[in-house]
Amino acid sequence: MSGRASLRHRARAVLRDESGATLVEFAVAIVAVLLIFLGTVDFGRMLFHQVAAEKALHRAVRIAAVRPPACANVPEVHERPDAPGTGTLPSYGTSCSAGSGVCKNAGTQICTAAPGNATAEEVWALVRPTLPNTATISNLRFRYAFDPDLGFLGGPYVPNVTVELQDLNFTFVALLPQLTTLAVGADDAFAAGTVAFPALGASVPGEDLALGTDG
């Protein structure tokens, strides 16, 4: 066989050689399988945390509703408005819902949970086991909103109480972001291995907020 014929024969042999094709196909397949498996595990973890946290918040907000306020400047009692209308003033004991302006609108007080606050610590102890490991007490927020249909003039201040989870991230296992980026690309946040955890909250009408320090 001449040198040119030998060269053509070797070229055809190389083109017909499929010994590496199986390895390439395996590499593609294993990435897809790992994406499905790890995605199922991680998104299942995130869904578990979300459902568990929602249930914990519904219990936590009931605790917050009967404990001293976690926020500053929440009134202790329903007071008269700063500029009452003309005519006879309603007597103490009149329901706030008896008419407009019976009880002073105290607005809405919002605060981030602070370590050392008894109410915040109690709520956090209940919610913390349901959350991702990156959660801290600062992800917990309280809201006390005036409601004219609750309470009576001169009686314990009764707002609507809300407990929320905010600004929390969920961290994936190490390989999922890298595999997803390799396969289809991903934004910077996901490539870094984290996504925003859904904001959650629960509200109930307050009770007497356990006025004083014995709540």
Image (cartoon, rainbow, N blue to C red):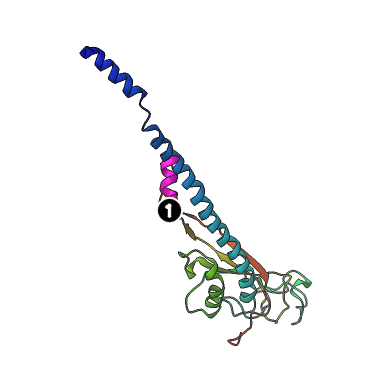
Give how far across and how far down residue 85 sits, in percent. Answer: 72, 72
Q: Is residue 190 left or right of residue 73?
A: left
Query: Overall secondary structure of the magenta stretch?
Result: helix
What residue is drawn where x is 32% and y is 24%?
A: 14
The local crowd at label 1, few if under 14, some if 14 to 19, many if 20 or more residues have their Cα within 10 Å, is: some
Q: Is residue 35 magenta?
A: no
Residue with the most extreme bottom position: 214
Q: Nearer the viewer, residue 132 or 112?
A: 132
Give me the residue at 40% from left, 52% from top: 192
* Horizontal arrangement in the rendering, residue 204 relative to residue 1 (left or right): right
Amino acid type for the residue under numbered disc 1: Gly
Q: In the rendered structure, which segment of residues is drawn in magenta?
A: 173-184
Q: Secondary structure at mark 1?
A: loop
Q: Position of residue 69 (x, y in %)?
A: 58, 77
Where does label 1 land, which residue?
Answer: 193
Q: Is residue 186 visible?
A: no
Q: Quadrant of the C terminus?
A: bottom right
Residue 195 in picture, x, y percent from top left:
48, 53
At x 55% / y 64%, what residue is drawn? 165
